Each structure stands twice: as structure tokens, then as C-alpha cells.
Image (spheres, helix red, strand yellow):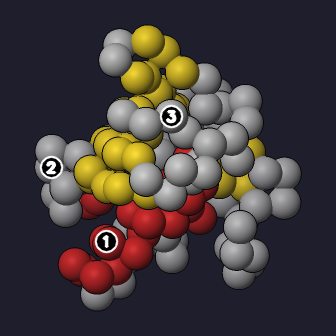
Amino acid sequence: MKRVTLIVRQLKLSRFFPQGFHMTVEDDASIIDVLKAEDEEVRKKAGCFPVERYRGLLQMVYHPYEKRFYKQVAVQAHVKYEPLNVWENLTKPLPDGVTVILIPEDGCQTDWEEPVQRRMPDG
């Protein structure tokens, strides 16, 4: 098991975990697994996902068919102040002690992609 911290810079989500979402995950957990875990915890606390139009953070930031983040999403990760590129391979296991900062909307000044509204596959 390893420790991961996820900080989400989105007003309706960050109020549930203002100091970041600290979790223990399996050794082979990727950023996708971390986002799924965050979605479960937010639903437990809120009863449903609090951002209109979305079923979860994963749906908000991840293109399920192309297996990548949407263009408007910004993500930074580091372990002990060493940067980590999670953008390249979203299924790669994260290292222990990683901190991920995710900005779901307006993080990058690029064209906006409309998130896929169809039911997402598991994984």
C-alpha cells in the first residue's frame, strides 16, 4: 500500500477536502484509480457528485475512448518536490508519497473539449 494526496482546484469539490484528499491505495494504483477513489468519497459525503452535468471527477477530466485527459485539464504531480509526469501514461502506477494537483476546468489555455456524456466503462 502507498500514500497519495490529491488536491482538486475546483470550488465545489475542494470544500469536501480543503487540505487535499489523503488516501492509501494499492501499490499498482494509477492516477485513474486515485480519481475513482476520490469520486467514491465525494459521493459518500455529498450523496451525489456536486458539480452539475457530471457524474464524477473522472468523467469531468478523462476522455474514456481516447484514454487521456481533456485539453482544458491541468495536472501536476510531484514526489518530495521532484516533478512527475502523469500526463503521458495515465495507467502507470504512481509512486508512494505522490501529491497530485488537478485543475479540472480552465487549467490550460487551449480549446475546450466537451466531456463525453455516455456511461463510462470501468477502468
Residue 119 rendering spot, x and y as whole percentages? 71, 81
Q: CA distance from mark 2 to mark 1?
A: 12 Å
Residue under the point 66% across and 59% down? 115
Which image quarter is the C terminus in? bottom right
Q: CA distance from mark 2 to mark 3?
A: 23 Å
Residue 64 rendering spot, x and y as whole percentages? 76, 61
User: Which quarter of the figure has residue 47?
Assistant: bottom left
Kindly identify which residue carries mark 1: 42
State whether residue 114 appears in this view: no
Q: Secondary structure at mark 1?
A: helix
Q: Please state which amino acid type lies under the numbered disc 2.
A: Pro
State whether residue 47 appears in this view: yes
Q: CA distance from mark 1 to mark 3?
A: 23 Å
Residue under the point 31% across and 71% down? 42
Task: Left or right? Give the position of 119 relative to 53.
Answer: right
Kindly identify which residue carries mark 3: 95
Q: Secondary structure at mark 2?
A: loop
Residue 99 rendering spot, x and y as whole percentages? 37, 33
